[in-house]
Amino acid sequence: MSASESDDEVVLDKEYVGAPPPPGVHVPTASELLSLCDAEVPRSTLTLPSDPPSGVPAIWVKYGYAVYWNEVLAQSMAYHELRRLGSAARAPAVYYAFQLYHTVYLVMEYIPGRTVGEAMEDETTSDEEKEHIKSLVALCLSEMHRIPIAPGTRPTAIDGGKLRYTGLDDSRGPRYYENTDQLEAHMNKEPMVFCQSDWYHGNFMIDDAGRIVAIDFSETSIVPASFARYKLYDHRLAFDLPLEQVYIPMEGGIDNVNAVNSVCGIMAMASYFFARVGKRTPGGTDEEQQRLKETSKSYYPRPDEKLET
């Protein structure tokens, strides 16, 4: 998106208006957020009450120069698509977001609960309850992998930029991809999936109704299924998830997880090596990369998308 002008006449670099809030919830304007938030912090949060106050926050604001626009669009996509699937897993609704200079402000639904990490580390949590929590995390990941991705979709971050994936050395891919053919130099063709790749126990929570919620989407991209499958072996959950509990579409028996393991190992040691290899594959020249950067569009929301309210 190009620079836009919000209702309160603050000229913004990017702006996103998401799901309508429930009655009694005031979504702050850009000017109000700028007066409440310190733009010079890498990442911070604040809560805002309902009107009239109910004793429970109504809005959660995440902001900072280390909050990425990709998170805004990926979280909104997860919220709408999980609802469309009728999923038992959920993501917080995105009400409003904007970027001013390098700082992103993300206004979302406040969901009462505690993180999976807090629940697992609680001494009062029984072994049986811990196993149930693990199954909920597996369910959440499986449901996100079920989000429909159109055949032929190019590997991309949700905001249209380079892949954001925690298996990469700096969590971002070394190049843009125009179509799946260009990635076949690294991977054989396989189903593309919505992949929240930062599997950390603080990025999932159990709400007060016992439902599983995904709450961090900065490292989310559309990737070949083997990249999602690789996360079963490379994550920060502090507990293992049985392979059979996490649904990942692997049509036709295609499974390149060993290749992903090899590639990510190389990138972790020397990401410049993978970048050099990428320049030798189709679409990897400086000229082609500049063209893709200039023409890349956000994967979500799509122009014809009818969002659930």
Image (spheres, rainbow, N blue to C red):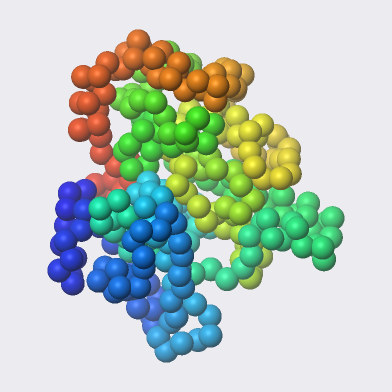
* Residue 67 drawn above or below residue 21: above
The residue lying at 49 percent from left, 77 percent from top is 57
On the picture, is 69 further left or further right than 5? right
Would you place residue 170 above or below residue 110 in this image?
Answer: above
**Residue 154 image point, x, y percent:** 36, 29
Quadrant of the image occupied by residue 132: bottom right
Name of the residue lying farthest toward the right: 127
Asked if residue 309 shows in the view, the reply is no
Could you say which quadrant of the image residue 167 lies in?
A: top right
Which residue is more in the foreground, 15 or 151?
A: 15
Residue 127, percent across and down?
84, 55
In percent of width and height, residue 211 lies at 62, 62
Query: Going by the picture, which residue comes out furthest to the top?
Result: 280
Residue 123 is left or right of residue 36, and the answer is right
Q: The C terminus appears in which quarter of the rendering?
A: bottom left
Could you tell whether 196 is left or right of 253 in the image?
Answer: left
Residue beneath the point at 53% across and 68% down = 111
Looking at the image, can residue 35 be seen?
Answer: yes
Q: Residue at x 45, y 80 (%)?
A: 49
Image coordinates for residue 140, horizontal then vertical, percent: 59, 50
Q: Is residue 149 above or below residue 96?
A: above
Q: Is 42 above or below relative to 283?
A: below
